[in-house]
Image (cartoon, rainbow, N blue to C red):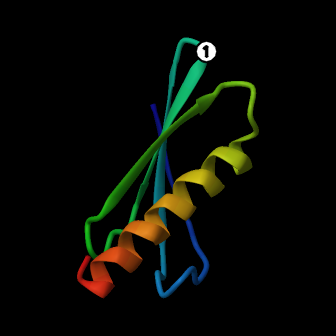
């Protein structure tokens, strides 16, 4: 299990935490907005780059936060 923070301003988020867990040939990636506690989880192939997996989780987190802001 690996946890780390990625800095930088992203859609109003000052920080996003990522956790990556390899499960066989797959990797489960969790992106967490520490301010709101909202989590987004994606599962991808272990052959994908760390960057690709993080970006997929980050995009999902951004969509979830946008829905929350819009009241959906």
| Residue 49 in view in this figure | yes
12 vs 25: above or below:
below
Whether 47 is drawn above or below 52: the answer is above
- In the picture, measured across the screen, residue 4 lies left or right of residue 41, that is right
Quarter of the picture holding the N terminus: top left
- Residue 5 in sight in this render: no
Asked if residue 40 is positioned above or below residue 19 in the image, the reply reads below
Indicate left or right for 25 with 67 as reference. right
Q: Tell me where residue 9 appears, x and y as whole percent.
A: 58, 84
Q: Position of residue 64 (x, y in %)?
A: 38, 67
Q: Residue at x 34, y 75 (%)?
A: 67
Tally of numbered discs: 1
Vertical position of residue 55 compared to residue 13: above or below: above
Tell me the quarter of the picture where residue 47 sits: top right
Residue 18 horizontal/vertical position (percent): 49, 52
Residue shown at 61%/15% (left/top)? 25
Question: With 70 as the anchor, is 58 left or right in this view?
Answer: right
Q: Which residue, given by chain and number where applicable, does mark 1 sit on?
A: 25
Determine the secondary structure under disc 1: loop
What residue do we see at 45% from left, 63% from top? 61
Residue at the (53%, 83%) spot, across then down = 11
């Amino acid at each position: 299990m690996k946890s780390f923070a990625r800095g930088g301003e992203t859609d109003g988020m000052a920080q996003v935490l990522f956790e990556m867990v390899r499960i066989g040939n797959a990797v489960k990636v969790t992106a967490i907005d520490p301010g709101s506690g909202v989590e987004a989880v994606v599962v991808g192939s272990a052959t994908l780059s760390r960057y690709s997996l993080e970006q997929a989780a980050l995009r999902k987190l951004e969509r979830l936060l946008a829905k929350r802001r819009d009241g959906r």
